[in-house]
Image: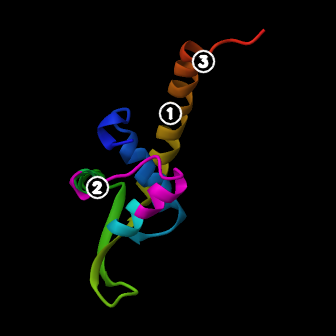
Amino acid sequence: MKPNDLVQGTLGLLILRILALEPMHGWALSQRLKQMSKDVLQVGPGSLYPALHKLEQEGWITAEWLISDTKRRVKFYSLSKEGRKQLEAQTADWKRLSGAISAIVLPVRS
């Protein structure tokens, strides 16, 4: 499933959730998303980096240049305190929204 197929704003929520596990650079984040979704969700750089930039502008993540395991200079992203609050709020919203959609889309079993 491509990012355009996702509900608007969902990519930001997924990024926040993944960064809540540990700080990481963009490529590792895209690989973790792919792995956690069992290869259903794949996000390319054209969607990932603008989303990361937006989250950084909002103050929900922070970024710093570090040296990766492969000895390359990469930008590592971390969840901020505000980002953790936002993750909680967006998770609650997601649960409400997905529950409402499930009630409509999934058949009721008697």
Q: What amino acid is labelled 2 in the image?
A: Gly
Quarter location, residue 78: bottom left
Question: Which one is in front, 56 or 85?
Answer: 56
SS type, badge 2: loop
Q: Residue 44 carries which label?
A: 2
Toward the top, the furthest residue is 110
Q: Can the viewer see residue 79 in this picture?
A: no
> What crowding class fits label 1: few (fewer than 14 Cα within 10 Å), some (14-19), or many (20 or more)?
some
Question: Which one is in front, 69 or 12?
Answer: 69
Q: Please name which of the two marks, 3 or 1, marks the residue nearer to the observer.
A: 3
Could you tell me which residue is drawn at 49 percent across and 39 percent down? 89
Q: Which residue matches tag 1?
A: 94
Label 1, label 2: how many angstroms apart (C-alpha)? 23 Å
Q: Are marks 2 and 3 in contact (CB under 8 Å)?
A: no
Q: Which residue matches tag 3?
A: 106
* Among the two numbered marks 1 and 2 on one chain, the one whose residue lies closer to the N terminus: 2
Q: The magenta stretch spans which residues?
A: 31-46
Q: Position of residue 56 (x, y in %)?
A: 28, 57
